[in-house]
Image (cartoon, rainbow, N blue to C red):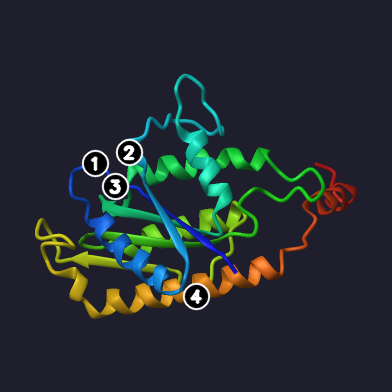
Amino acid sequence: MALKALFLNCTLKKSPDVSNTHALIDKAVVLFKEMGIESDMIRVVDHNVAFGIYSDMGGGDEWPKILKMIKLCDILIIASPIWFGVRSSVAQLVLERLDGTYMEGDPETGQYPLYGKVAGVIVTGNEDGAHNVSANTLFNLTHLGCVVPPNADCYWVGDAGPGPSYIEAGGDRHLYTNRTVRYMIHNLAYFAKLLKENPIPTNLRKLDEEAKKVSNR
């Protein structure tokens, strides 16, 4: 069964600047390849993505072509550095733009475009914040329709204060990060296959009508 993974690298660094987040993504890409899963990676900041909450903001907005790739993938992974203890502004922008997919429900079931996809998160940075970034991002993705398997996050964080980041610090040899990236990849692949074979049957439109009958506001 052919599965496709898409990584959205939400680094603040434009290409060709070195991205620590990209380096950790590369590990995940190799692991997916070993399982026969093809991956694409988009460095969001390299594209003209407008601020907003609609799928197309016009005026040269390049989000629509990124969204097209999101809709075609089976596995979606948001990868973000930590800034001031939270996800990057680029990652926040991505989630805000995905808000527009709520208005693109399936005509029959009302399911959002991200239904049937599994989601994961990759995080890099110094000091704390990995749990914050993972928790909020994965929660947001479930609301958009994604399924989140167990152990669907992988992160590397350095010591408190300024210092070497993932590449310079030799994070590629860190046991916890190497363990969790494997947990994440295998669980994402397994659940993506399950969903491909067993699509979620929930009819949101029907449930909306049921809710209206017992609601007065």
Of the 4 image quadrants, the one containing the N terminus is bottom right
Q: Please state the horizontal and vertical placement of residue 168, each as a whole percent of the image.
A: 10, 62
Q: Residue at x 45, y 74 (%)?
A: 35
Crowdedness near tag 2: few (<14), some (14–19) or many (≥20) residues, C-alpha within 10 Å? some
Q: Secondary structure at mark 1?
A: loop
Amino acid at the residue labelled 3: Thr
Q: Secondary structure at mark 2?
A: helix
The mark lying in front, picked from 1 and 3, is 1
Amino acid at the residue labelled 1: Ser
Q: Please state the horizontal and vertical placement of residue 115, each as a whole percent of the image.
A: 65, 56
Q: Which residue is mark 1?
A: 15
Residue 45 is tagged as 2
Q: Please state the horizontal and vertical placement of residue 152, each as a whole percent of the image.
A: 45, 69
**Nearer the N terminus, badge 4 or badge 2?**
2
Q: Secondary structure at mark 3?
A: loop
Of the 4 image quadrants, the one containing the C terminus is top right
Amino acid at the residue labelled 2: Val
Q: Which residue is mark 3?
A: 11
Q: Which residue is mark 4?
A: 187
**Nearer the N terminus, badge 3 or badge 4?**
3
